[in-house]
Image (cartoon, rainbow, N blue to C red):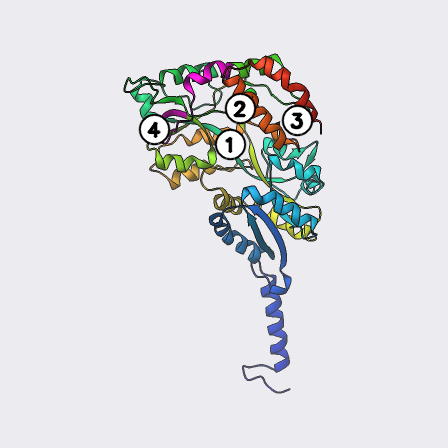
């Protein structure tokens, strides 16, 4: 046999090279183009978010052989485009699902994620409220990956200037009921130049009516959003806000310096801190219980997907590795989101990334212990329900009607919509 120019026989060298190639391809992180499986992932993003996600998709491509092709739209266009793709037979394999995606479950587009979860291939523990938020009538329709919530922000300087103690840092503190909150807000609502016009409001927040009873410790809508709940506790909560709110609440701005406190979404924490040096975090006031709304994002495989195995491979790869998930969440949500998985402590990373902001990050981290599901969106007719509740709230808040009278008047039409 003719010796090979590089030593050894041609056959031996060819066999050795072939074996070496097989060994290389078997190593983690090395995937041949022919082995790649492409999945189509659809999400509602802005261009900066889409760009930030590219490195995690490249990592998935290299490590697990899944080529994630991203399609994104604005939030407002997302549902229309998704439905159009499904109808045309070009449905994506994977989408971002939220609390308000129940319409897609009702239409048979999403659902059945329980079967995947029951395989045991997700090895980390999901916060139970996050799972509950993506469950509709007993059916899981998404694997949670991120939790955003609503909490309170306040201006330390305004509290100092008024000689007031800061809000507590603990969600279950006995001090910091809604009565405490409004009493403090009243002291912070000021006509600074004595011209008869309020210059500094206690609270820059006009909350939606369906949230108010939650914060009190009851619900306005029945679990599963089937009927309107007109219980004494619900009536009391809404009337309480209507009686106290107009004197201390406005459409002022915390970061603009015209309000001392505000409710805000955790996803804008750093934005607020950058604009207001004296900004800090506080729990939501407590009614009968401490409560933070759970706004959950999850990944879900569409029923029409032809690449279910690859889509599931991507999901498990993402959520089982804390670093992969953190990389993904920071790219998609920025600083302020929480992980849907126990043990992850993102606020500690935020504190390290922004040492110049002396925020009580523990308030945000502890919110996961008090998360509650917002069942208001758990109905396919929510787009019709929301304006009705908004009108009712404006009438109650404006003093044109009592909470009891308005809720009783709403009950027939609301119950009809909720049962659809």
Q: How far apart are marks 4 and 1 (CA)?
A: 23 Å
Mark 3 — residue? 225
Magenta span of residues: 240-261
Dot in front, 2 or 4: 4
Which numbered disc, 4 or 3, marks the residue that appears first in the sequence? 3
Mark 4 — residue? 257
* Residue 383 locus on image (x, y percent): 61, 33
Please tell me whether residue 245 belongs to the stretch shown in magenta.
yes
Specify few, some or many for label 4: CA neighbours under 10 Å numbering under 14, 14-19, or 20 or more: some
Height in image: 302 above or below 293? below
Mark 3: which secondary structure?
Answer: loop
Indicate left or right for 54 with 41 as reference.
Answer: left
Location of the C terminus (image quadrant): top right
Q: Which of 5 and 239 is in front in this view?
A: 239
Q: How far apart are marks 3 and 2 (CA)?
A: 19 Å
Q: Distance between the residues labelled 4 and 3?
A: 38 Å
Mark 2 — residue? 291
Mark 1: which secondary structure?
Answer: loop
Residue most extreme to the left: 193
* Residue 14 locus on image (x, y percent): 62, 77
Q: Are marks 4 and 1 in contact (CB under 8 Å)?
A: no
Q: Nearer the viewer, residue 268 or 170?
A: 268
Residue most extreme to the front: 400
Q: In which quarter of the image is residue 194?
A: top left
Mark 1 — residue? 149
Mark 2: which secondary structure?
Answer: loop
Q: How far apart are marks 3 and 1 (CA)?
A: 21 Å
Which numbered disc, 2 or 4, marks the residue that appears first in the sequence? 4
Query: Residue 8: in sight, yes or no?
Result: yes
């Amino acid at each position: 046999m003719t010796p090979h120019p590089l030593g050894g026989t041609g056959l031996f060298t060819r066999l050795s090279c072939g074996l070496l190639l097989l060994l290389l391809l078997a190593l983690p992180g090395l995937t041949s183009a022919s082995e790649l499986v492409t999945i189509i992932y659809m999400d509602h993003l802005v261009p900066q978010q889409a760009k930030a996600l590219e490195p995690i998709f490249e990592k998935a491509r290299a490590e697990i052989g899944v080529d994630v092709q991203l399609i994104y739209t604005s939030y407002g266009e997302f549902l229309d485009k998704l439905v159009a793709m499904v109808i045309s037979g070009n449905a994506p394999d994977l989408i971002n699902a939220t609390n308000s995606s129940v319409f897609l479950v009702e239409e048979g587009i999403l659902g059945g994620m329980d079967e995947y979860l029951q395989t045991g291939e997700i090895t980390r523990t999901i916060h139970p409220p996050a799972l509950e938020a993506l469950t509709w009538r007993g059916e899981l329709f998404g694997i949670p990956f991120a939790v955003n919530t609503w909490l309170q922000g306040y201006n330390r300087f305004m509290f100092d200037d008024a000689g007031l103690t800061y809000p507590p840092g603990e969600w279950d503190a006995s001090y910091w009921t809604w009565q405490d909150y409004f009493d403090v807000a009243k002291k912070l609502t000021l006509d600074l130049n004595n011209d008869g016009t309020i210059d500094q409001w206690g609270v820059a927040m006009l909350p939606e009516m369906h949230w108010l009873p939650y914060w009190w410790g009851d619900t306005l809508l029945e679990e599963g959003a089937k009927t309107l709940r007109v219980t004494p506790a619900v009536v009391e909560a809404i009337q309480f806000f209507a009686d106290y709110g107009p004197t201390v609440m406005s459409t002022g701005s915390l970061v603009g310096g015209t309000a001392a406190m505000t409710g805000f979404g955790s996803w804008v924490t750093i934005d607020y801190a950058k604009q207001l040096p004296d900004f800090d975090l506080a729990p939501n006031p407590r009614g009968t219980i401490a409560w933070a709304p759970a706004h959950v994002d999850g990944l879900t495989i569409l029923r029409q997907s032809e690449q279910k195995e690859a889509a599931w491979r991507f999901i498990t790869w993402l959520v089982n590795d804390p670093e992969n998930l953190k990389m993904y969440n920071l790219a998609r949500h920025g600083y302020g989101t929480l992980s849907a998985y126990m043990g992850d402590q993102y606020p500690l990373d935020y504190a390290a990334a922004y040492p110049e902001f002396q925020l009580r990050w523990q308030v945000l981290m502890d919110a996961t212990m008090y998360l509650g599901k917002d069942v208001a969106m758990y109905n396919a007719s929510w787009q019709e329900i929301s304006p009705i509740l908004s009108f009712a709230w404006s009438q109650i808040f404006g003093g044109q009607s009592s909470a009891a009278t308005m809720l009783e008047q709403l009950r027939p039409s609301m119950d009809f919509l909720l049962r659809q």
